[in-house]
Amino acid sequence: MKRLRIMFFLIVMLLLSGCPKTKILEQQSLTLAIGYDAKENHSFQVTASLLESEEHAGDTNRVVTVEAETSKSARRKLNEKLPNEIATGQTRVVLLNKAIFDQKMLNEVYVLSRDPFFGDMIKIAIVDGSTEDLLTHPYEKFKNIGMSLNSLLEHNSRFNWVPELTLHDFTYFRDTSTLDIAIPTIKREGEEIVITSLSLLHGGDIVGEASSKEGFFLKTLKGKKTPYLYETIIKKKDMKESGMDQYFHTELNDENTDEVKVVFSIIKNKGKVKLVDKESRTFEASLDIDINIEEISQVYKFKENKAILALEKQLGKEVSKDLQSFLDKIRKVNSDVVGFGELYRSHSKDGKVVDEQWGDMFPNIKIHGKAQIDTIRTGIIE
């Protein structure tokens, strides 16, 4: 009797396993990137970059554009234009044009995080211009624009100054008043797609932009290891305090040039944010950076005693000045992308009050930026 029950159970399980609809890869369209452009009538122009596997033609790239009121209706209309059903969970990149922020149409983007069609770890970027133009342009060098966009964002978030932002992050920060977000901004320049800046947000508005150098500061202060090639121009008149002006070969350099260009690669970086005084809301943001000197525009006496110390002191001064400029910018535009509000909240007895008032507090806090430079290699032969 027991054996019969087991056999019956196995037969039922076998029958049930054949019931669900089987989705074969060759019968699906993979949406690798999808772009949303806001229209004046508050509808969306939705453009999808797809990869389709066809039995006799191999992988086929396709770009389809539809106009829709919601993301759900957009998917329905996309399916109506395709020979295969769109696969769930295969999207890698979501692109938004700036008009979505201007027209307060972000709610539809937040909805995406609850849609099983999209995964939480999808990368988000803002497009300077039209997402339709960026996705539909007939690129000669990109086999599939969706795959190329994913690789571009992945590479630069891992090995460069660009912070990664996922759909999960984007949705989470919507309800966080003590921390704003910075979103990579991309642009088509002819046949190339480049990451031009970071869009700084406050709430649902784009309030400013950050350069690549400022992106490096942001990632470092948030504890991310960030290789970066740093370039700075130093006025000779500003070198006296550090003593750097004493170590140039006057007979080998152009005396009429009043500035020196220095390029160095950052091989190790560490950032720290500290609440110095709670009552006056004073913070300190510090960087510790190990560098290799890559290039200096005038002949420098690296082998002389204290020449490297003078150079480190001067570079520390220049980087501190750039860092302070970035910190002043985010205060001015009221975009706390670093997370000073989170730190202040952790030191406050009433976190709810901080949540409610941080938007008014942040522009008026004090932040002091400083950088410490240590030179590992100068590029000269000892």
Image (cartoon, rainbow, N blue to C red):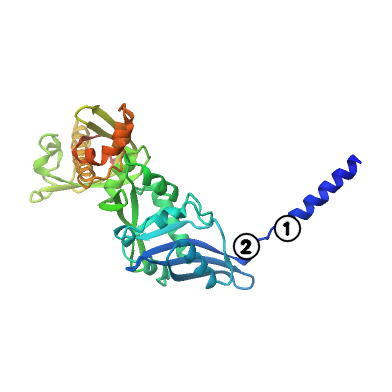
Q: Position of residue 60 (x, y in %)?
A: 55, 70
- Tell me whether circle 1 and circle 2 mark residues in contact (CB < 8 Å): no
Residue 138 showing in the rendered view = yes
Q: Residue at x 69, y 57 (%)?
A: 20
Total number of numbered discs in the rendering: 2
Q: Position of residue 62 (x, y in %)?
A: 50, 70
Q: Residue at x 10, y 36 (%)?
A: 240
Name the amino acid, label 2: Leu
Name the amino acid, label 1: Cys
Which element type, helix, strand or loop, lies under badge 2?
Answer: helix
Answer with left or right where residue 238 lies relative to residue 282. left
In the image, 259 versus 39, the foreground residue is 39
Residue 349 versus residue 29 in the image, above or below = above
Residue 377 showing in the rendered view = no
Which element type, helix, strand or loop, lies under badge 1?
Answer: loop
Q: Earlier in the sequence, mark 1 or mark 2?
A: 1
In this figure, which residue is indicated by the disc labeled 2? 25
In this figure, which residue is indicated by the disc labeled 1? 19
Residue 198 versus residue 271 in the image, above or below = below
